Image: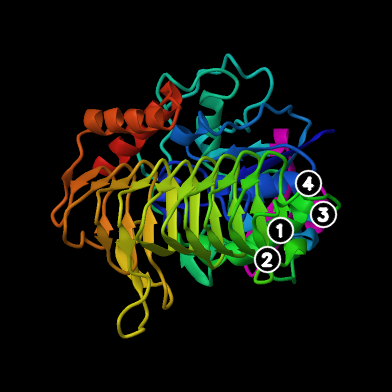
Amino acid sequence: MERRYILFDTPARDLLYPFTHTRPVAAIRVGILTIREKWERWLNASTSFLTLPYLQEKFPLQTIHAEDQCVLINGHILPDHKLVAAVQALETGQELYWEGVLVAKVVVAGSLKLPESGGRGLPVAGDADYSGGDAHVGGSGYSGGNSWEGAAGPAINDSMGDIAEQAHGDSLVGGSVYSGGDSSALTVHHTAVVQRLNYQESVQQLTYPWDIFRLNDSALRQDFSLLTEGRTSAPISGSNQVNGAENIFLEPGAVVEHSILNGKTGPIYIAKGAEVMEGCLIRGPLALCEGAVLKMGTKIYGATTLGPGSVGGGEIKNVVMLGYSNKGHDGYLGDAVLGEWCNLGGNTTNSNLKNNAGTVRVWVEARNEAIPAGTKCGLIMGDYSRSGIGTMFNTGTVIGVSCNIFGGEFPPKFVPSFSWGGVHPEPYREQEALRDARQWMQFKGQQLGDVEERLLKAVYAKVKS
């Protein structure tokens, strides 16, 4: 009986908009690695996703067999060695909870009963001819369509009725109850007898977008140990001024010249193909993922991650760029998260602290209200969004997916996905938004594929409905 590890979204995924408009929770990067990559390294096994239908094509669920053990793991939760050991120790029919939150459960694939699929289970080998029906997930009305075909297609749509059931059907996050909006039907039943176990150690989980930068320091340090333990760094060029070299790791092919690196304040990880140009001032923790670049004279402090292919410049503090995004010029970015394929024009600056040092309230799209996010929160920007030169973002501003923001005044503190403009944004027409996303990816040497285009069209239909 083979174990299949599946990272599932819960209804609380909606609280992580705009980032979960375009990905499952476990595909979010925090630290050096995405949550999925962390679990795979800890488990020494592959994983797959169970998420909303329109995301499932890009983030597929692996084909399983009816007799396989499915280890269903909450994709919001960051692993560590104690938690991984507890998950690996689970047996069929056991569930692991932490403070009322379902962490993991183990079931036999054939025992899952999914109400929306007429009692069918997860997609298994031999299901390729199952035609299925429309899948209405969490009230979003998304019906799958003709693009969800084959063993990993319609059956996935039908499986989305029931994968993360908490004790009373709600999703418990951060001590509060969230019953779900677009994703409220993400719950799972199975026919086997369930034994509930409680996990007593501490757990880190993503609940709101600002948790990404809030947890980045501890996650980066843990990932650094995970990636470098027992290994030797590539040589650090003598042109650099270095402090705390034992906390600095360069992968083969990394380029760092004529810069100041302080590893005493936290680890510095430079991946293959990443480059630190001359004159950079770096205080760890810092992660430059594969192909990322720090431009000349960049100042980095606070736990900062530049995901694959990202570019950093100016002054950056406690920032996570998920991947392929640019802040390549002067201007300040602090306590912020940029999705993928974002670009900040020269001298774009965010405020991360109110003038009275009071609590920052940040708009949560799924709740349709602003809630407290602590004393520091800068810019939260979804995938494929951009700002023009000189753009100013107020404290705790949220920009949705595929927005084009420009003008000399502060834009609103919440700009919905597919918006265009400044103080009074207008709707960004679908074809123009897709055209501009395609051109931006081409500028970075990649293509907007059919899968990504279908995904963006699904997001557009959802947010405009």
Q: Residue at x 33, y 64 (%)?
A: 350
Query: Which marked residue is nearer to the observer: mark 2 or mark 3?
Result: 2
Q: Amino acid at mark 4?
A: Leu
- The percent position of residue 150, horizontal first and vertical second, equals 56, 17
- The percent position of residue 106, horizontal first and vertical second, equals 74, 47
The residue at which mark 2 appears reads as 263
Q: In the displayed structure, would residue 128 be above or below residue 163?
A: above
Q: Which residues are magenta?
A: 85-111
Q: Earlier in the sequence, mark 2 or mark 3?
A: 3
Q: Residue at x 24, y 41 (%)?
A: 464
Q: Secondary structure at mark 2?
A: loop
The residue at which mark 4 appears reads as 43
Q: Earlier in the sequence, mark 4 or mark 2?
A: 4
Q: Does the magenta-highlighted stretch encompass residue 110?
A: yes
Q: Amino acid at mark 3?
A: Glu
Question: Which quadrant of the figure contains the N terminus?
Answer: top right
Q: In the displayed structure, would residue 411 be above or below residue 65?
A: below
Callout 1 crowding tier (Cα within 10 Å): few <14, some 14–19, many ≥20? many
Report the disc number at residue 229: 3
Q: Taking the image as drawn, is residue 227 in sight?
A: yes
Q: Earlier in the sequence, mark 4 or mark 1?
A: 4
Callout 4 crowding tier (Cα within 10 Å): few <14, some 14–19, many ≥20? some
- The percent position of residue 349, horizontal first and vertical second, equals 32, 62
Task: Pick the residue in front: 279 or 209.
Answer: 279
Query: Which marked residue is nearer to the observer: mark 3 or mark 4?
Result: 3
Q: Residue furthest front?
A: 239
Quadrant of residue 445 in the image? top left
The residue at which mark 1 appears reads as 248
Quadrant of residue 44 in the image? top right
